[in-house]
Image: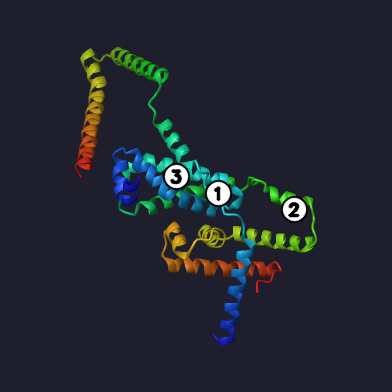
Amino acid sequence: MALALEESDAQLVTRAQSGDEQAFAELVRRHSALVFRLAVSILGKEFVPEAEDVTQEVFLKVHHAIRSFRGESEFRSWIYRIAFNKAVNLKARVRFRSPHADETVLEDLAAPEPGAERQMQTAQRDRAVAECMGTLPEVYQSALRLYYWLGAGIGEVAESLGVPENTVKSYLHRARQLLRSMLKERGYSCE
Amino acid sequence: MSEMDTRQNTSNEDGMDRLLRQSMAAPVPSLRHDFDQRLMRELRRSEQPLDRYGRILFLGYGLVSVVVSAVVMHSQGLGWGFVSGTILAPLGVVAIAHAAWRTRHARIHAIHHSQ
C-alpha cells in the first residue's frame, strides 16, 4: 500500500488499464470521498443515499471505460466531470420526488421549546434560502453547498467543478447577489 | 462608485455570507466506511462471465441461428460453399480481432512489468 501511495494517478491509471485491480482500488480510495462530496453538493442534503449511488455508478463507469482514457486531461478532472453529469441527470429525475424525511425535524415539531417562535422563523428563513437556491444554475448551487455546507476551500471547489479559482469566487459572489435580491423580494433582510 | 456604496456592498456580502453559513449548517455526510469493499465486490460481480446455464443458452442460440441462416440461404438458391463462406468469414474476422487484442494486451502487460 505504501508503494501505491507514492504512485501518481497517471501511473495507477496505466496499471488499471492493464487489468490491475489493486491499482483501481487505490484510485477509488483516493477519489471516492471527493466524488461523493461533489455529488452531494449537487443533489443536496435530502438526497445523501442517492449521492452514494451516484458515486458507485461513477466508479463502475470509470472501470468500464478506463481503457479508453487517453490521459489528455487529468484523471481526476475526468471522473469529476462524469460525477457532475451523473448527479445533474439524477437530480432532474428526482426533482419531483419527496426527499428523505429528516427525523430531527419531526422531533422538533413534536416538542416545542421556549423560543419556538424564533426557531420557526429561522426554519422559514432556511426554507426560503433553500427554495431560492434551487432556482440558481447548478454550478452556483454546487459551489455554494461545497463552500458553505461541506466546508470546502476555494481550491477544492475549483478542482471539483473543473474551473479556475477566480471563476469560483465569481460564482460565489454572483450567487450571493442573486440570493440576496430574491430573499429581499420575499421580505428577508440579509444585512 | 462612492465609498459609501462600496461599504454598503461589503456589508451586504458579509451579511449574505453569515446568513448562508447559518442557514446551511448541517452535519456533513460521508461515504459508508465499507464503500470501497462494496464497490469492488460489485465490480467483480459485473465482470463475471456468463454462468454455466447462460453459456449453454448463448451457445444454443448461436447454433440455431447459424443453422436457420444456412437453411434459408440455401433455400434461396445459394450453394453450400458460399453459405459456409458467409457464415465462417465473420467468425474468422472476430477470431483474428480477438487474437490481436490479446497480443496487444499481453504486450502492454509485459512493458508495464519490465518498468
Q: Which of the pair B90/A45 is nearer the observer?
A: A45
Which residue has dot 2 on it? A108
Task: List x then y, in percent, for residue B24.
Answer: 61, 60
Which residue has dot 3 on it? A58
Point out the frontmost of discs 1 and 2: 2
**Residue at x 24%, y 20% (from the top left corner):** B88
Task: List x then y, in percent, for residue A40.
Answer: 54, 51
- Contact? badges 1 and 3 (CB < 8 Å): no
Task: List x then y, in percent, for residue B3.
Answer: 56, 87
The amino acid on which the numbered mark 2 sits, given as a three-letter code, is Asp
Chain ID of residue with mark 3 = A
Point out the frontmost of discs 1 and 3: 3
Q: CA distance from mark 1 to mark 3?
A: 15 Å
The relative height of residue A32 versus residue B84 in the rendered view (above or below) is below
The amino acid on which the numbered mark 1 sits, given as a three-letter code, is Lys
Q: Is residue A158 visible?
A: yes
Identify the mark at residue A91; answer none if there is no mark.
Answer: 1
**Residue at x 50%, y 66% (from the top left corner):** A171
